[in-house]
Amino acid sequence: MTPGGATKHKTNMKPIIKFNNGNGAILCNCCRVIIKEYLTKEEIEGKTNLLLCEKCEEKRYLEKCKELLEYFNVDYSKDTIKLTDGGNSCIMNPKSKFYKLFGGYSINSIAEYVAKKLGKKTIYIDY
Ligand SMILES: [Zn+2]
């Protein structure tokens, strides 16, 4: 697998604003569920960061986490995800494509998050 290859997807999402009853509502870009009703003037003009409902947001975040683990060769396909000493290093390079989402986080902490979400265990391997 090439880093940042197959799992890369574009995120040019725009807020979806609908007016059914005059109040307006923001819909999730993914599942079209209503995220927010009774919008402010700014939100009606599209000035909002609300693109996805909580569920879809979390799903998307998890996908990004997996992408990061693949990039750093952390295997999350088994029942137990191995944490290593190297995994304690944090994403600190602002030029890294992962910095925006994961800046300051360690690879291990992301592995732990993925493990929790996928119902897996983590084990610390000291080389
Ligand atoms: Zn959704």
Image: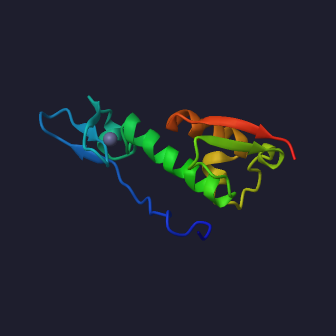
Q: Is residue 105 visible?
A: no
> Which of the 4 image quarters holds residue 49?
top left
The quadrant of the picture showing ligand 1 is top left
Return the x and y of residue 24 as percentages of the image width and height.
Answer: 21, 36
Looking at the image, the residue that sits furthest to the left is 21
- On screen, residue 63 above or below 1: above
Residue drawn at 36 percent across, 37 percent down: 53
Left or right: residue 123 versus residue 14 is: right
Q: Is residue 71 placed above or below 101 in the rendered structure? A: below
User: Could you tell me if residue 124 is visible in this image?
Assistant: yes
Front-lying residue, 124 or 38: 124
Q: Residue at (68%, 58%) from the top-left corner?
A: 73
- Left-right relation of 115 to 6: right
x, y percentage for residue 54?
Answer: 40, 35
Residue 105 figure quarter: top right
Residue farthest toward the top in the current orientation of the protein: 38
How many marks the image carries: the answer is 0
* Residue farthest to the right, as pictured: 127
Q: Is residue 78 left or right of residue 39?
A: right
Image point 62% across, 57% down: which residue?
70
Image location of residue 117, percent across then percent down: 51, 35
Does 67 sit above or below residue 123? below
Quadrant of image for the N terminus: bottom right
Residue at 31% x, 48% y is 30
Residue 41 pos. (x, y %):
32, 36
66 relative position to 54: left or right: right
Q: Quadrant of residue 120?
A: top right
Q: Residue 102 versus residue 35: which sits nearer the camera?
A: 102
| Residue in the foreground of this view, choosing between 50 and 97 | 97
Q: How is the image coloured?
A: rainbow
